Image: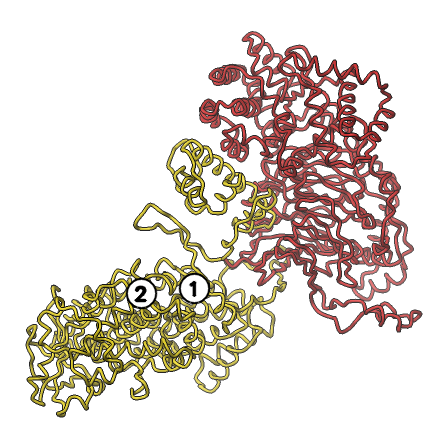
């Protein structure tokens, strides 16, 4: 009996057996045995079989009993609550933890034949201290309307929205008309007022469907950037209104926004139209909607990713669509980039390359678009690498630090003013279980279990596409004490830093490693993999600036040991893979005039290597000029048509092709 | 209505009421129960035979023995005195009973009775003045849910022991297919009737196999023959197919229903003779035993019924109703309206002012008045059940009602009502029940989050009465004292009533709008004051979810029904029920008072509608024909007809006087949760989960049916298949399931439901 009860509550392993004479689910005896073992009971085959059958029967019985609660609640959908009530009335313990409204993904484990419902840990502290208290539902109210007068109803088809506007109360109708007129009208001042009101009015819940309908009109004004912008602003206002419960309208809003991000708008035919900004804005808006209201619709994240992926993998789509997909992914966070963009990059690269390598005049416009896409991808992967590195450090230190990466994401999300500034990177998953099968386990989860690509491997791969332009960008971003110019992530990092100094010190040190790695001397470059550096060296070089100015060998060892220490269980040789690509002339050979290559190769790719190479002659003593400074000066990426050999060191001038 | 705040009730009165319930309320069933426990040898006893006196006494003795064993000496004394048994008699009989019982296979009567009764006495108060009938009867009615109560369930085996007799398991299929072949070979006119046997035989044979641990045979049997059963038994078959072990039989409610009640079949004498001859020729004792033990064949003289006639009546959990059950006289007429001195002048003035057609008004009014003065021959006596006296405010309300009814729109197929839809927005917590007051001024909603919310539908806001301290200050003699006692500060459009600890499944306003009833999953019915918006009483008694509650049209009384399979009649000033209506084989899902307040109709998951007499708690009608749980009931305003709606989307119309089905309204595609007749009864409105309101021509439906005594006795009903003709209109809501329907006094149709955005 006891076992039965515990089975009942632990029943996560249910396997369907396709036996014809039965029309219901069965629990296999293996599962019973497993569960018994987990509670320390050894079961014989016979007992397990009997128990399995009994459990099935009890399950069916409970389900049958629960259906009456559903019927009396006048619902069509059987809820967890119904089952729990049936259990309670039959003196069985209820099952806790399944009351969430989102669908619980039932996942198989790749290694074994194990199926389970993902049950992630919830950080109660964070939940309790969160300032983004979930919006309560709007107040329950009763609205009356005459549906059918003398038995003759409005014969228009039911369910379409605009006809129903007439059934609104007069003031609401007026409000609706005024607001839509103001927002879509010419007067920017009026529009601002209207948007502000939309953002703060607490009584417009009844109008929500109509506004959503208006917004869904983006498809009809795709030629008019201005209107599109206004509609997006309207979305933003609605999303920011704290009194509105968007419910399933989120889906509709998201689809409108996605339209602006992804579609080859009529407005983008004219190159003079700045549809890029519109797409950027829409992408930011998308991420904002997702982060604030994503929990309203289950599987939203997954759907968004899917549609973005579809666009990205469709070579027929124009480049502006691809651009939208990339910025969309970027806005959704680095994990989205890692999940979708990164695996697609090799395939996509070939297409982009073809565009960029076409110098014909007719291609000029397309090529310009191509550069846009290129830039967007670069920004996205750069953030991906940085955040991944950061999260790895946090993950390693997570348990000690108390609030692992999640905090950062939450803080960022909270303090972010959406749509106006780039949303900070979410370091963790979305707050609730949205399409969690697409995402990493909790911040505390070991990455290795599900991440196919380790950071070094990823860096290598990306480096093969972007070359040193990637590496150089790295030096610009991270906040390095006070000396660094503020990079895109600066605000986020800055906020974090005072909170917990010890781990963040590590973070800040983590970034320059990549930069410093470029100082690897060719002396060891030929065979860096076979030369594991003694980790003891790490201790000798404590500071970052010291590392930069010190000899290349020591700095590279620092980086190596750092990365290895930050990821326990990873071999040092793996972690060294991050840095073998940048090649420098021997410092000893050191005439003050040497070159800095920003070059990329693609090993083993079918497409031709594309190199963005920039060379410059730095002013003599290298030690006084950290490479970062140069990198920062590189505003533009040049390219050469001639492939570079692996170890060649060419001199190029700085191109400014754009 | 008597004030409920009065405080403690008179316990004495309560005790007096109780025996009455027990003895009267259930006696009509007792005969069969007694005979059910006694098996007679096959082929000799008539199926409907009553219990011999001797057996009766044996039962009594068994009860006595049990009481003695448990040292309930007081009860023993009472029982002995009432039954008139001597002590010596008891001793000798007891040995007789148990000794004789052990011998044959179906025996053990005394023992089984003993253990059965143990259940009863565990639940019933010990000082219960009992007649033996009552005990067994209570056992019969309450048994299923008592099993849910008791953990160890020691007595299930006794209940099931009837299955212990067994034939050769592999032969079951032979028996069954033998009968099947026979039935298929008989004349068409008999085939339909005899086909009724298939389902109950199938079920009992299957259960016998399961009970005797022939799992594989049971499965094979099920797979082979389950396809032959009527489609409307699918739900039960689904549950049955999951039962494969003897252990499962314990505590399964559906199974217990099969066992504890006899499946009733109506078969014409000719067909029955045919069957009997066949079974005798084949010496098919197995099947004959089952028919004897578990089936009740109601034989009638006359033509065999056709397939469609049978189908329209069958479908309930325990077959059709026995004919004699529905023979009791039902006083379905309306009570005489009390004479109220209507200030005629006032009204006429008003009428003139408003409409300018005083003449017409007056004639109408007169007709109304004269109607109310004539005593309906079918009406119960005015004082058949005591009704609360009219208060001044009630009289005022009656006057208002009369005024309103003069302005009523006469509905008909040509003149359909306007529909107003009250949509509950943002009801994410789940709207489960709705009710309007009769004058359509208040709206109450019960929610799954245990709250009850009351809205004012008129511009008049809801106000609480001032606190006691403030009330003292008020001058009580002033004219507007009623206005003064209200606290203006609390005025709001809606009020929330907290108190329940489970979803609220039923709400009902009192006719005087001072009280609100709510029934909940937590097993209580609560009475709320709409003056103070606080809970006044929690009526505990059901102990299981209470699915529905309904106020009497005269106030004071109310009825509730729940998962414990009984409906209870309460008075607002008694904390214990006045009557217990026991007899349903499954949950009582909906309850309605008859307009004359003398009867209560209940719908149940056992797919029957029952009508109960409030006076003596007798079941006076059992209406079968629904194929799914019944979720809505409505009496026609003249009290003659009843409409019931079920999960299968059909509305059935019943003639209460004859106890006959007179119409079937097909069209809805989902559960019907709301039914309401228009104020004059011309139109029946039905609201369903399929987001539609449908209007039906009830006048036509009632007129077309000729009900005479012949059809009443044999059940040869001819249902015209005219749903499409009767359907006057179908109206879609905006993805809002219709939870409640209400006709205002002027025949405007109000519908209510929660908007469902998914």
| x, y percent for residue B222 | 48, 26
- What crowding class fits label 2: few (fewer than 14 Cα within 10 Å), some (14-19), or many (20 or more)? many
Which residue lies at the image location 75% right of the left edge and 62% below the top edge? B533
User: On the picture, is A229 further left or further right than B497?
Assistant: left
B307 and A587: which one is in front? A587
B37 and A375: which one is in front? B37
| x, y percent for residue A385 | 27, 72
Would residue B659 be seen by someone viewing this image from the given angle?
no
Q: Colour of chain B?
A: red
Disc 2 element: helix
Would residue A230 be seen by someone viewing this image from the given angle?
yes
Instruction: Provide the residue designation for mark 2.
Output: A308
| Circle 1 chain | A
User: On the picture, is A618 further left or further right than B292?
Assistant: left
Q: Quadrant of the rendered structure where residue A394 is?
A: bottom left
Instruction: Provide the residue designation for mark 1.
Output: A251
B646 and B728: which one is in front? B646
| x, y percent for residue A588 | 8, 84
| Circle 2 chain | A
* Residue extending furthest toward the top: B281
Q: Colour of chain A?
A: yellow
Disc 1 element: helix
């Amino acid at each position: 009996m006891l076992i039965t009860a515990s089975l009942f509550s632990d029943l996560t392993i249910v396997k369907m057996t396709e036996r014809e004479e039965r029309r219901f689910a069965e629990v296999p005896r293996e599962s019973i045995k497993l569960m018994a073992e987990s509670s320390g009971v050894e079961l014989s085959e016979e007992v397990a079989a009997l128990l399995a059958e009994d459990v099935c029967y009890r399950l069916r019985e409970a389900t049958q009993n629960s259906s009456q609660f559903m019927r009396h609640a006048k619902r069509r959908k059987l809820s967890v609550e119904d089952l729990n009530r049936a259990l309670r009335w039959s003196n069985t313990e209820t099952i806790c933890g399944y009351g969430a409204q989102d669908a619980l993904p039932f996942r198989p484990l790749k290694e074994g034949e194990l199926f389970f419902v993902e049950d992630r840990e919830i950080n109660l502290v964070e939940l309790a201290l969160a300032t983004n208290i979930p919006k309560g539902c709007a107040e329950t109210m009763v609205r009356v309307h005459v549906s059918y007068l003398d038995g003759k109803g409005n014969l228009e088809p039911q369910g379409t929205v605009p006809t129903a506007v007439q059934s609104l109360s007069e003031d609401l109708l007026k409000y609706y008309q005024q607001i839509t007129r103001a927002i879509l009208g010419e007067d920017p001042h009026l529009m601002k007022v209207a948007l502000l009101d939309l953002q703060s009015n607490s009584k417009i819940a009844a109008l929500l469907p109509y506004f959503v309908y208006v917004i869904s009109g983006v498809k009809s004004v795709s030629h008019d950037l201005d209107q599109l912008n206004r509609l997006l602003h309207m979305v933003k206002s609605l999303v920011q209104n704290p009194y509105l419960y968007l419910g399933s309208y989120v889906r509709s809003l998201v689809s409108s926004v996605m339209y602006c991000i992804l579609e080859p708008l009529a407005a983008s035919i004219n190159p003079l139209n700045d549809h890029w900004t519109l797409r950027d804005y829409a992408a930011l808006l998308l991420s904002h909607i997702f982060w604030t209201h994503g929990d309203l619709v289950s599987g939203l994240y997954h759907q968004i990713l899917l549609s973005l992926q579809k666009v990205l993998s469709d070579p027929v789509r124009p480049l502006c669509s691809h651009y939208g997909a990339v910025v969309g992914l970027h806005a959704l966070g680095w994990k989205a980039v890692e999940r979708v963009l990164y695996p697609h990059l090799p395939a996509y690269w070939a297409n982009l390359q073809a565009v960029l390598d076409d110098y014909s005049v007719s291609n000029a416009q397309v090529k310009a678009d191509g550069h846009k896409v290129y830039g967007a991808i670069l920004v996205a992967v750069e953030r991906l690498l940085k955040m991944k590195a950061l999260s790895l450090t946090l993950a390693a230190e997570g348990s000690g630090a108390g609030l692992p990466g999640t905090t950062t994401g939450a803080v960022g999300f909270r303090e972010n003013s959406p749509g106006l500034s780039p949303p900070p990177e979410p370091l963790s998953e979305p707050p609730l279980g949205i399409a969690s099968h697409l995402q990493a386990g909790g911040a505390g989860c070991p990455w290795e279990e599900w991440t196919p690509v380790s950071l070094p491997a990823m860096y290598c791969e990306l480096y093969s596409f972007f070359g040193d332009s990637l590496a150089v960008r790295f030096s610009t971003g991270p906040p390095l004490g006070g000396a660094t110019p503020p990079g895109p992530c600066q605000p986020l990092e800055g906020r974090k830093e005072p909170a917990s100094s010890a781990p963040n010190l590590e973070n800040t040190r983590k970034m320059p490693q990549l930069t410093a790695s470029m100082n690897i001397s060719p002396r060891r470059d030929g065979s860096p993999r076979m030369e594991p550096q003694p980790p003891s060296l790490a201790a000798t070089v404590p500071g970052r600036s010291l590392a930069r100015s010190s000899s290349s060998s020591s700095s590279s060892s620092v980086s190596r040991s750092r990365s290895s220490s930050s990821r326990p269980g990873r071999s040092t040789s793996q972690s060294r893979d991050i840095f073998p690509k940048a090649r420098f002339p021997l410092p000893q050979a050191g005439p003050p005039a040497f070159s800095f290559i920003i070059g990329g190769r693609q090993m083993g790719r079918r497409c031709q290597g594309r190199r963005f190479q920039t060379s410059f002659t730095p002013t003599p003593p290298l030690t006084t000029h950290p490479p970062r400074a140069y990198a920062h000066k590189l505003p533009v990426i040049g390219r050469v048509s001639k492939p570079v050999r692996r170890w060649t060191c060419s001199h190029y001038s700085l191109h400014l092709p754009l | 209505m008597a004030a409920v705040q009065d405080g403690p009730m008179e316990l004495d009165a309560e005790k007096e009421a109780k025996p009455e319930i027990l003895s009267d309320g259930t006696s009509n069933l007792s005969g069969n129960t007694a005979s059910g426990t006694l098996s007679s040898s096959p082929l000799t006893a008539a199926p409907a035979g009553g219990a011999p006196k001797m057996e009766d006494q044996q039962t009594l003795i068994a009860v006595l023995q049990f009481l003695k064993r448990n040292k309930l000496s007081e009860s023993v004394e009472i029982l002995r005195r009432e039954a008139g048994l001597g002590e010596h008699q008891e001793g000798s009989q007891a040995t007789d009973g148990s000794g004789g019982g052990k011998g044959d296979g179906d025996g053990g009567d005394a023992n089984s009775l003993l253990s059965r009764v143990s259940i009863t006495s565990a639940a019933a108060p010990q000082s219960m003045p009992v007649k033996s009938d009552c005990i067994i009867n209570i056992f019969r009615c309450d048994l299923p849910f008592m099993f849910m109560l008791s953990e160890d369930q020691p007595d299930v085996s006794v209940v099931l022991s009837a299955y212990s007799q067994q034939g050769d398991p592999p032969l079951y299929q032979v028996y069954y297919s033998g009968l099947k072949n026979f039935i298929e070979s008989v004349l068409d006119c008999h085939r339909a009737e005899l086909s009724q046997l298939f389902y109950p035989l199938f079920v009992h044979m299957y259960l016998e196999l399961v009970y005797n641990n022939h799992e594989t045979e049971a499965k094979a049997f099920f797979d082979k023959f389950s396809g032959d059963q009527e489609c409307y038994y699918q739900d039960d078959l689904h549950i049955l197919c999951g039962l494969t072990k003897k252990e499962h039989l314990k505590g399964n409610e559906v199974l217990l229903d099969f066992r504890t009640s006899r499946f009733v079949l109506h078969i014409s004498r000719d067909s029955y003779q045919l069957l009997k001859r066949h079974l005798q020729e084949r010496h098919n004792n197995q099947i004959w035993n089952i028919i004897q033990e578990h089936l009740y064949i109601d034989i009638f003289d006359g033509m065999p019924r056709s397939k469609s006639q049978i189908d329209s009546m069958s479908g309930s959990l325990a077959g059709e109703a026995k004919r004699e059950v529905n023979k009791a006289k039902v006083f379905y007429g309306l009570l005489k309206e009390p004479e109220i001195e209507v200030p005629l002048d006032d009204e006429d003035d008003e009428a003139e002012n408003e409409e300018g057609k005083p003449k017409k008004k007056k004639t109408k009014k007169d007709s109304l008045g004269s109607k109310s003065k004539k005593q309906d021959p079918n009406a119960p006596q005015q004082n058949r059940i005591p009704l609360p006296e009219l208060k001044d405010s009630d009289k005022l309300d009656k006057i208002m009602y009369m005024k309103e009814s003069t302005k009523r729109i006469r509905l008909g197929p040509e003149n359909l009502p306007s529909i107003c839809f009250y949509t509950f927005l943002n009801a994410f917590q789940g709207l489960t029940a709705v009710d309007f007051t009769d004058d359509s001024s208040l709206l109450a909603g019960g929610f799954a989050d245990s709250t009850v919310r009351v809205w004012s539908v008129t511009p008049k806001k809801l106000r609480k009465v001032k606190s006691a301290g403030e009330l003292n200050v008020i001058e009580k003699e002033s004219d507007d004292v009623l206005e003064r006692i209200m606290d203006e500060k609390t005025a709001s459009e809606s009020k929330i009533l907290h108190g329940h600890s489970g979803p609220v499944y039923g709400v009902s306003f009192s006719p005087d709008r001072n009280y609100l009833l709510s029934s909940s999953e937590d097993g209580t019915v609560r009475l709320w004051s709409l003056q103070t918006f606080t809970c006044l009483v929690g009526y505990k008694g059901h102990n299981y979810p209470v699915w529905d509650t309904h106020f009497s049209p005269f106030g004071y009384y109310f009825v509730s029904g729940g998962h414990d399979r009984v409906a209870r009649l309460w008075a607002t000033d008694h904390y214990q029920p006045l009557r217990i209506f026991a007899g349903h084989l499954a949950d009582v899902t909906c309850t309605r008072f008859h307009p004359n307040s003398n009867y209560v109709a209940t719908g149940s998951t056992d797919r029957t509608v029952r009508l109960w007499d409030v006076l003596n708690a007798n079941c006076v009608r059992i209406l079968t024909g629904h194929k799914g749980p019944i979720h809505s009931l409505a009496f026609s305003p003249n009290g003659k007809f009843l409409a019931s709606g079920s999960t299968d989307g059909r509305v059935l119309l019943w003639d209460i006087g004859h106890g006959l089905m007179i119409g079937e309204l097909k069209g809805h595609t989902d559960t019907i949760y709301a039914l309401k007749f228009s104020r004059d009864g011309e139109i029946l409105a039905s609201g369903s989960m399929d987001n539609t309101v449908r209007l039906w021509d009830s006048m036509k439906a009632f007129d077309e049916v000729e009900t005479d005594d012949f059809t009443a006795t044999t059940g040869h009903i001819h249902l015209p298949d005219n749903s499409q003709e009767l359907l006057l209109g179908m109206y879609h809501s905006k993805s809002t399931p219709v939870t409640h329907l209400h006709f205002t006094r002027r025949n405007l149709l109000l519908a209510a439901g929660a908007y469902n955005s998914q």
